[in-house]
Amino acid sequence: MRRQISSCSIFVSLALFAIAPAAQAQSPASPDWPVLQHEAIEKLSDYVRVNTTNPPGNEIRAADWYAKIFKAEGIPYEIAESAPGRGNIVARLKGSGTEPAIILVNHMDVVPVSRSHWTVDPFAGIVRDGYLWGRGSIDMKSLGIVELLTFLELKRLNVPLRRDVIFLGTADEEAGGIYGAGWVVKNRPQWIKGAGFMLTEGAGSLADDSGKAIYFGVGPTEKTPAWLRLIATGRSGHASIPIPDSAPNHLIAALDKLRQYRPPLELTPPVEAMLKSHAPYEQEPWRTRLADPQKFLAEPDAYDLLEKRPDILARLTNTISITSLQGSNKTNIIPSEARAELDCRLLPSWTIDRWVAQIGSIINDPAIRIEVILNFPPAVSSTDTPLFASIEKAVHELDPGAGVVQSVDAGFTDSHYFRDKGIVSYGFEPFALMEEDDERVHGDNERIPVKNYTDGVHLFWNIVYDFASAK
């Protein structure tokens, strides 16, 4: 159980969110790109140095870092802590209000590092060999800075807006967002009042081996987590005399059944749209297979072929990863209880009750009970929106050779908290990455190519300007 959440708010201005729309101002609405891109590199390097490893988070450090920038730029903001040190920050540029606001969401926490496996200091923000290195350089401090600079430039250039633009930095996404986006939506609804659209991480964008963008992904939905705990019980005793039906033995037998379980293939509408949109960027025979996924999945060897493409298989099945085991704390004791934790990810069509029942039927052992650690219901945003159109327009204008594809994230982000409130929410990352770099996320030597990152600053600005400005 999580401890009781306490909160405090820091109000920096009585005129919070009171930046008046610059409806009369004539704005060039064109940033000085070399200057802004240089600023993007400097700010990301500096931001990476703010250690917000979760656990424990300490996102208040990042919130204070953002606050100094907003204060220097004359932008009111608010900070609220969901628990000591778990900071969240918001700022708002006011528009005419003729259209729903857009929220630019970024989480400020990062996952832990194994320093001995890094070739650079993971919190130094070093620029070397054409890359900016450091924990969070991809996930997701880079997008946080892109959102920040877009937000700042709208203010600096006095761009008249037809909708409010909200900057929101949150805590705790890497552990489920309970202290971050989930807390904000519940306890600070005024922060997102009037919002109809949201952009955050998710739906990766792909570059070829030269770094040239192949496509940019937009994620209207994602798989949902079903993190489970299995608790096996049995007779305890001295380990010198084996107990066949001990708790560890029950647990091991159950886990082996789950390890061998082959979940059925299921083609949901969002995944079908994703596969079809990705098909043109695949080599044969996958190009043909994904162009008509229903036909492909009907083939008798489809499952065997998909096991060679786990990235696709994960979007067509519920998945189970065994991630934690606990038993005795002493070698010669057979414990009366043994536990395991599972990271399961569910397709949009599944509920947690249905999945728990499915796991129970696979295990089929009354000595094991199942507890739900984390879950939230599935939600899907439409792609028939002006925001999706602005993304497509910006991509095709700046990079005519790149495509725009739909994606279903195999993981999860903070998006679901906003979709549950009826806010159209997309995962979108404006920098295309080579597979080698994308695979470093949550791993060792995380890094982002500087050119792709700074190009992303331009792309993201074009999207938000097209979507929010009073043209």
Image (cartoon, helix red, strand yellow):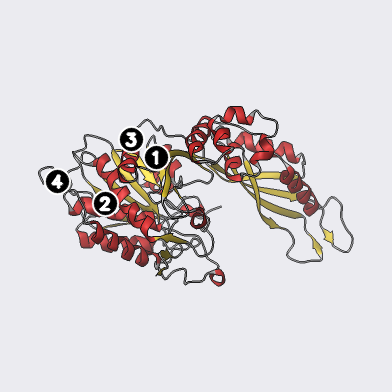
The residue to which callout 3 is attached is: 389
Q: Sequence-wise, which precedes: disc 1 or disc 4?
A: 4
Instruction: Specify the quadrant that holds the C terminus.
Output: top left
Residue 22: assigned label: 4
Q: Quadrant of residue 9?
A: bottom left
Q: Secondary structure at mark 2?
A: helix
| Tag 1 residue | 425
Residues marked 1 and 3 touching at CB (< 8 Å): no
Gap between marks 3 and 2, in whole Å? 20 Å
Give the camera-side residue of 310 and 259. 310
Pair 3/2: label in front: 3
Q: Earlier in the sequence, mark 2 or mark 4?
A: 4
| Distance between the alpha carbons at the discs numbered 2 and 4 | 14 Å
- Residue identified by numbered label 2: 151
Identify the amino acid type marked 1: Ser
Q: Position of residue 326 (x, y in %)?
A: 70, 58
Dividing the picture into quadrants, the one containing residue 160 is top left
Could you tell me if the residues under marks 2 and 1 are in contact, i.e. CB atoms within 8 Å?
A: no
Q: How many marks?
A: 4
